Amino acid sequence: MDSEHYTPLPEDLRFHHKDRHMFFHVPVMVFFFLITVAVAFIGGWYVYFKQKSPSSPSNTLPSSEPTPTRAIEDGGVGPNWTRQLNTECGTTFFVPPAQEPYLIPRDPNTLPTATDDEGKFWIYEDNQSNLFMFNHLARVIFKNPEIPGSGYVSAAVEVMCAENTERYSTESLFVKIQNDLLQNFSVISLASSGEASLWNREVKTAVFKGGTFSNDTYYLFATNSHIYLIRSTGETSNPSVQQVRDSILLNLGFE
């Protein structure tokens, strides 16, 4: 174009090159500034509410307090355990299956004996048996049924019962047994007694001495239909067998 016929714009309407450059960058800088402020605000909000909200159970550190014995009951019964109802006592037992880890395999290079745990598994039994006022015994015992009994018991949970025809309460049942010991069982005496909370009820505890009694703790209580004398016993030193025995005891059910 001929410069002689070119009419320049007025000075106040012209953009110099530097002005155009600044005009482009100002919105970009404002945009990134707003993004930075938004990210900082969201991050601060998240940290604040994360601290205020309760921790997720999966992130909670385990308690330093010892686990109560009751926890064995909550996690001790496996899905393949069977329920066994004893109608004489109105009692339900949970019985582990005759397979590992509840069965201890036999060593083929040694002879089986009654005084070790090899070849044994948990077996349910019940029969008539008399002790004090009780006339029926139901139990789950860790044994090898092919070996005759020798008096050695690896582990067992035993429930003795009778019908509550005299309408005993737990307290009056315990008094009755104490009186009978004083009057009729001169060889057997009560070594110690106490109370415990088991099976969602308050029970009496007793340790007897004399006769064939050892240091086992017995649990006594009465319901409207039955009276009970219960113990967990055994001479095994195997902690796995002992834990299963404790779980069987704590998971007993009563009508």
Image (cartoon, rainbow, N blue to C red):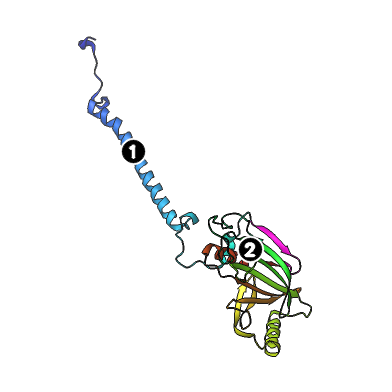
Query: Measuring 60% from the left and 54% from the top, which residue is drawn there?
Result: 99
Residue 5 appears anywhere in the view: yes
245 and 225: which is toward the camera: 245
Disc marking residue 105: none
Q: Is 211 on the left or on the right of 52, as rendered?
A: right
- Mark 1 belongs to which amino acid? Phe
**Which residue position is annotated with label 2?**
147
The N terminus lies in quadrant: top left
**Which residue position is annotated with label 1?**
32
Q: Nearer the viewer, mark 1 or mark 2?
A: 2
Q: How far apart are marks 1 and 2 (CA)?
A: 85 Å
Residue 82 belongs to the span the image colors magenta: yes
The C terminus lies in quadrant: bottom right
Residue furthest left as drawn: 4
- Mark 2 belongs to which amino acid? Ile
Circle 2 packing at 10 Å, graded few (<14), some (14-19), many (20+), is few
Task: Specify the segment rendered in magenta.
Answer: 81-93
